[in-house]
């Protein structure tokens, strides 16, 4: 497949909503995992930047420069040669390698609906590599690829759900799909027979931990990961820190409160994984 033909002219948008979109060739597509990702062999990021623009996003700190960091959420770079780079790996297939898709972007960006870059990467992995794949997303678009997930021998879909409150979600994850949409989507993935996990990474203020836990359990999923939210100054990349702190105060969200909520949720969800990283390798 010619790289130039992967995206049609109609699909090559330079702006989607508030996001400025660029198309660039990347030097590589698989990054050897290290540090807190060391449970994996590689991370795979079809995009850099992220339209979801979560205010606490650690990926923002890997931005190329301060301007990119300050405008996190407003720009996205499509790695237009991502598939070609992966196709080059056919000579040495990635048998049994563990891959995390994705560590510094969401593979189900809004633009993915049109570009199908992640979808084409999945097809390539299915056909030529027997990888062990973990997909991490906050997007309901993930259900589009259930047909492909079924073809993997080893796959886990992680859906991040951080709070039971839309008010809280809108402050910290203003451009992400709502909580209910995400829960519904991951339930659908699970019901299709795909191993799924709900990651509360990080856990944001929760109104009602009992009913939140019940709602999550109602999906039928039995894998959960939880991680505390750090409200340090450095963790905010956009101009919402004051608003965020106000919300945190309203919710009395402190380490003590986190521990209280955690205990309640642990009682309801016996196999709640507590991890610094929040990743659940398979
Ligand atoms: S969806 Fe993930 S990568 Fe995107 S801004 Fe939010 S935390 Fe960062």
Image: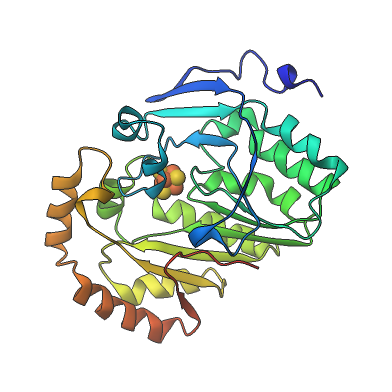
Could one spot residue 227 in this view of the protein? Answer: yes
**In the image, is residue 11 above or below residue 85?**
above
Q: Residue at x 72, y 23 (%)?
A: 6
The image quadrant that residue 82 belongs to is top right
Residue shown at 65% from the left, 35% from the top: 28
Classify residue 141 as left or right of residue 3: left
- Residue at figure coordinates x 18%, y 69% from the top left: 254
- Residue lying furthest right: 91
Residue displayed at 37% across by 79% down: 265
Q: Nearer the viewer, residue 144 or 42?
A: 42
Residue placed farthest to the top in the image? 9
Residue 177 appears in the rendering: no
In the depicted structure, whether residue 23 falls above or below residue 157: above
Coloring scheme used: rainbow
Whether residue 200 sits left or right of residue 83 in the image: it is left
- The correct choice, above or below, for 260 with respect to 230 in the image is below
- Quadrant placement of the N terminus: top right
Question: Residue 22's spot in the image, x, y percent?
Answer: 50, 21
Relative image position of residue 153 (x, y in whole percent): 79, 62
Residue 35 in picture, x, y percent from top left: 50, 59
Count how many numbered circles sit on residues in the image.
0
Image quarter hosting the C terminus:
bottom right
Q: Judge left or right: residue 261 versus residue 1.
A: left
């Amino acid at each position: 497949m010619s790289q130039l033909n992967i995206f049609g002219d109609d699909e090559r948008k330079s702006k989607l909503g508030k996001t400025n979109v660029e198309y660039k060739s990347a030097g590589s597509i698989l990054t050897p995992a290290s540090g807190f990702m060391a449970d994996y062999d590689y991370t795979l990021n079809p995009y850099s930047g992220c339209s979801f623009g979560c205010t606490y996003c650690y990926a923002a700190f890997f931005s190329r420069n301060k301007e990119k960091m300050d405008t996190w959420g407003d720009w996205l770079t499509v790695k237009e040669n991502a598939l070609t780079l992966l196709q080059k790996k056919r000579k040495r297939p990635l048998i049994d390698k563990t891959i995390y898709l994705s560590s510094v972007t969401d593979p189900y960006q809004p633009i993915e609906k049109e570009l199908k870059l992640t979808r084409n990467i999945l097809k390539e992995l299915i056909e030529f590599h027997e990888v062990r794949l973990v997909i991490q997303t906050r997007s309901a678009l993930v259900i589009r690829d259930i047909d492909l997930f079924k073809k993997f021998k080893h796959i886990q879909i992680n859906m991040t759900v951080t709070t039971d409150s839309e008010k809280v979600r809108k402050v910290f994850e203003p451009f992400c799909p709502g909580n209910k949409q995400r829960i519904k989507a991951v339930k659908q993935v699970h019901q299709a027979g795909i191993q799924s996990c709900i990651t509360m990474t990080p856990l944001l203020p929760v109104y009602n931990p009992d009913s939140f836990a019940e709602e999550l359990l109602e999906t039928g999923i039995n894998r959960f990961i939880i991680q505390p939210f750090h409200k340090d100054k450095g963790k905010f990349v956009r101009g919402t820190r004051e608003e965020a702190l106000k919300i945190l105060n309203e919710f009395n969200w402190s380490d003590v409160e986190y521990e209280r909520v955690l205990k309640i949720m642990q009682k309801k969800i016996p196999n709640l994984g507590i991890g610094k990283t929040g990743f659940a390798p398979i």
